[in-house]
Image (cartoon, rainbow, N blue to C red):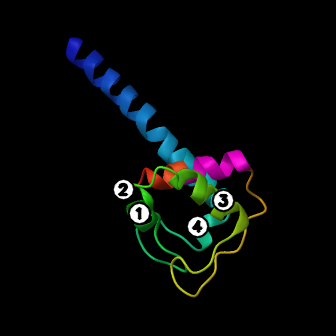
Amino acid sequence: MKRVLFVLAALAGFTAVSTPVHANEALAKSKNCMACHTVDKKLVGPSYKDVAAKFSKDAGAADMLAGKIMKGSSGTWGAVPMPPNANVSEAEAKTLATWILSLK
């Protein structure tokens, strides 16, 4: 019985830890971010893991990325610009940026 309770507790903890990742990926999909980006492969823009690798050591990266999500960007990853996403609020942009930086 103790083993069953331990396994259930472990699974509950795993679900609690993994849910925000899935929720934030769902947010990225709902805001059309995944039309140009994927988690682990370059598409039109860089993969989110590449973005995390490039900026994760920068203390201001979450704010900077949130700004780029809302206002657009060009030149950081090549000639293809990232257009602004008017459908993303400031809070959503911060959530997305924080999630992206967690994908190391």
Q: Nearer the viewer, mark 4 or mark 1?
A: 1
Tag 2: residue type?
Lys
What range of the chain is rendered magenta? 90-97
Q: Dot 3 corresponds to which residue?
A: 67
Say what secondary structure mark 4 lies in: helix
The image quadrant that residue 70 belongs to is bottom right
Examine the structure image and report whether residue 96 is included in the region drawn in magenta. yes
Decide if residue 1 is in sight here.
Answer: no
Residue type for callout 1: Lys
Q: Which mark is residue 29?
A: none
Mark 4 — residue?
Answer: 34
Label 1 CA crowd tier, 10 Å (few <14, some 14–19, many 20+): some
Main secondary-structure element of the magenta-colored stretch? helix
**Could you say which disc has been placed on residue 104 in the image?**
2
Image depth: mark 1 or mark 3 in front: 3
Q: Residues within 10 Å of mark 4 (few under 14, many from 20)?
A: some
| Residue that mark 1 sits on | 49
Query: What kind of element bears circle 1?
Result: helix
* Viewer-nearest of discs 4 and 2: 2
- Residues tagged 2 and 1 counted as in contact (Cβ below 8 A): yes
Q: CA distance from mark 4 to mark 2?
A: 18 Å
Picture quadrant where residue 49 is located: bottom left
For the point 42% across and 73% down, the residue is 41
- Tell me residue 52's x, y (percent): 43, 60
Foreground pick, 48 / 13: 48
* Separation (CA) of disc 4 from disc 1: 13 Å
Q: Earlier in the sequence, mark 2 or mark 1?
A: 1
